[in-house]
Image (spheres, grey):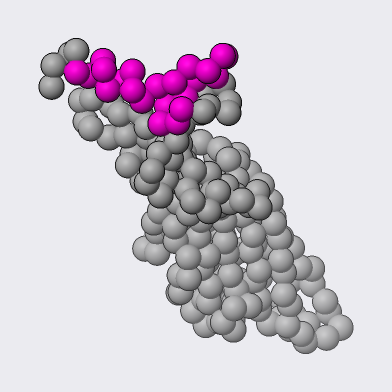
């Protein structure tokens, strides 16, 4: 196509109405008004060397969609709800029965692992990017009148950032359930894990299914 024909097509597609510019519409209702006959109107930016593109689009249901690297990454629906399907997140649960004190908690089941940043082999979540991350855990075990204090440490690169605690009860044998939550800043490639420690060496955690779980996600 000649340059002259390209300019002619561009002139046909663009309308200037006062201070408004329309592309794909002869009656622009905003400073820049883009319209398209397909299911999604979009402003698309392409990187020439790789061919990858990013875009901002509105579909026929009035959902605002944001694309990067050729795929949709975020959506704001017509009610204002924001969804980010690729946001890093994990949820793991259930430990081996009689998990011994003094080691990283070994979770046996993974329910959620968006982005595959949770590693089952070493029970670590590795931050893909720097940012604030929200972590939550709930842990369970049985104690006797002879056992001492329990600690579960949420650690970043082996350094304790949050400690959950259950003190000794010399009057009764009982089960204990401990829960904790914290938002922590991580740099890219730092890892988070959950370590079980206690003052007596003969203490252990119990399996008890969903009583033991650990989750986290990127806030931003």
Along the line of sight, which residue is nearer the eye, 185 or 64?
64
86 in relation to 104, above or below: above
82 in relation to 51, above or below: below
Along the line of sight, which residue is nearer the eye, 96 or 17?
17
Q: Is residue 120 left or right of residue 75?
A: left
Answer whether residue 38 is visible to the viewer in this image: yes
Which residue does the image show at 21% across and 30% down from the upper left? 50
Q: Is residue 53 left or right of residue 19?
A: left
Q: Is residue 164 left or right of residue 36?
A: right
Let me know if residue 9 is in the magenta part. yes
The residue most toward the right is 171
Q: Is residue 69 left or right of residue 73?
A: left
Along the line of sight, which residue is nearer the eye, 128 or 43?
43
Where residue 148 appears, x then y in whole percent? 74, 71
Which residue does the image show at 26% across and 15% down from the upper left? 7
Which residue does the image show at 53% across and 65% down from the upper left? 91
Numbered-mark total:
0
Answer whether residue 125 is visible to the viewer in this image: no
Quadrant that contains the C terminus: top right
Quadrant that contains the N terminus: top left
Magenta region: 5-26
17 in relation to 159, above or below: above
Where residue 6 appears, x then y in whole percent? 22, 19
Which quadrant of the structure image shows residue 15? top left
Where residue 44 appears, x then y in whole percent? 37, 32
Where residue 140 appears, x then y in whole percent? 66, 76
167 in relation to 86, above or below: below
């Amino acid at each position: 196509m000649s340059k002259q024909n390209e300019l002619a097509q561009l002139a046909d597609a663009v309308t200037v109405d006062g201070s408004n510019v329309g592309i794909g519409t002869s009656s622009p209702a905003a400073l820049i008004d883009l319209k398209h006959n397909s299911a999604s109107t979009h402003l698309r930016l392409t990187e020439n060397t790789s061919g990858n593109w990013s875009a901002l689009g509105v579909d026929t249901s009035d959902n605002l969609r944001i694309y990067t690297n050729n795929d949709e990454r975020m959506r704001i629906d017509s009610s204002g709800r924001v969804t980010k399907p690729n946001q890093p997140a994990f949820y793991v649960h259930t430990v081996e029965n009689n998990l011994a004190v003094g080691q990283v908690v070994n979770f046996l089941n993974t329910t959620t692992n968006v982005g595959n940043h949770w590693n089952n082999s070493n029970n670590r979540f590795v931050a893909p990017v720097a940012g604030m991350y929200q972590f939550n855990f709930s842990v369970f075990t049985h104690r006797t009148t002879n056992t001492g204090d329990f600690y579960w440490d949420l650690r970043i690169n082996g350094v304790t950032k949050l400690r959950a605690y259950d003190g000794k009860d010399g009057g009764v044998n009982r089960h204990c359930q401990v829960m904790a939550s914290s938002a922590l800043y991580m740099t890219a490639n730092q890892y988070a894990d959950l370590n079980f420690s206690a003052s007596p060496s003969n203490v252990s955690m119990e399996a008890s299914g969903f009583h033991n779980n650990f989750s986290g996600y990127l806030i931003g």
